[in-house]
Amino acid sequence: MIKKILSYFIPINIHQKNSEINKSLEVTWANGQLVLDSKNTNYSYGSLQRILRKGLHYIGFERIRGFKNVLVLGVAGGSVIKTLVDEIKFKGQITGVELDANVIEIANNYFGLNEIPNLEIVIDDAFEFVLKTKTKYDLIIIDIFQDTKMPNFLFEDFFINRINFLLNVNGFILFNTMTLNKKDKDRNLSYRSRFDENYSVRMYPKVEDHNELFTIKKLK
């Protein structure tokens, strides 16, 4: 409790772990809240939770409560999953895919991710998972970073087409991207152009400094 109070004045690190995939992972009390950070960016809770909450708000909490299956690619500390369960009161099945087992260990120990009954965590590469799964989803959340970098496969046609195939009609993709420079912004414009008239695409720039959100609805 003392650390929580002191964190309103100065961030207080309580756990640090080196990870082969994400390098440095830190759990910190900041402004009275536990957050998970990598070396250069927020991974869960803090600003990232605000970003993805806004994206879910754009889709509509009431609409999301009517969904049956949600896929989260890139779990980290599980802040978006907590928003789904605690705030939106989503009761359907949530499947979370995370490459780094160290992140999930931290999420379980510090953020109670393993206490969510309608959540299944899969330790796997997101690309490999979407190739293998036969399940269709009403909402696919893509939030994959390694520190400040986004893997190239997220923006390639094969992955985009596979995600679109796994999305139910009237379902949504919520894609969190980072735009640090003009190259990243051009990349996002190119990504948007990959969707035809069967999809409704909206971009939300400057959600938090360098983050740009996509919401994509499958119309038919």
Image: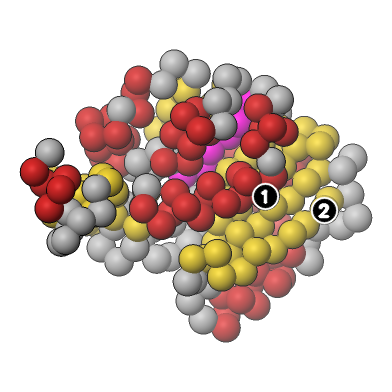
Q: Tell whether 85 sits left or right of 139.
A: left
Q: Tell whether 153 sits left or right of 209.
A: right
User: In terms of depth relative to the viewer, which is nearer, 211 or 5?
Assistant: 5
Rendered residue at 57%/19% (across/down): 91
Q: Tell whether 24 sits left or right of 138.
A: left
* Residue 54 sits above or below residue 136 on the image: below
Q: Tell whether 209 sits left or right of 183.
A: left
> Is 71 covered by the magenta stretch?
yes
Q: Which residue is the site of mark 1?
A: 58
* Residue 185 sits above or below residue 33 on the image: below
The kind of secondary structure element at disc 1 is helix
Gap in angstroms between the C-alphas marked 1 and 2? 13 Å
Residue 135 in view, yes or no: no
> Is 46 covered by the magenta stretch?
no
Find residue 145 and report its image quarter: bottom left
Rendered residue at 48%/37% (across/down): 83
Which of the two discs, 1 and 2, labels the residue nearer the N terminus?
1
Disc 2 marks a residue whose amino acid type is Ser
The kind of secondary structure element at disc 2 is strand
- What secondary structure prevails in the magenta region? strand
Q: Which residues are drawn in magenta?
A: 69-74
Q: Which residue is the site of mark 2?
A: 200
- Residue 136 picture location, percent across and down: 70, 28
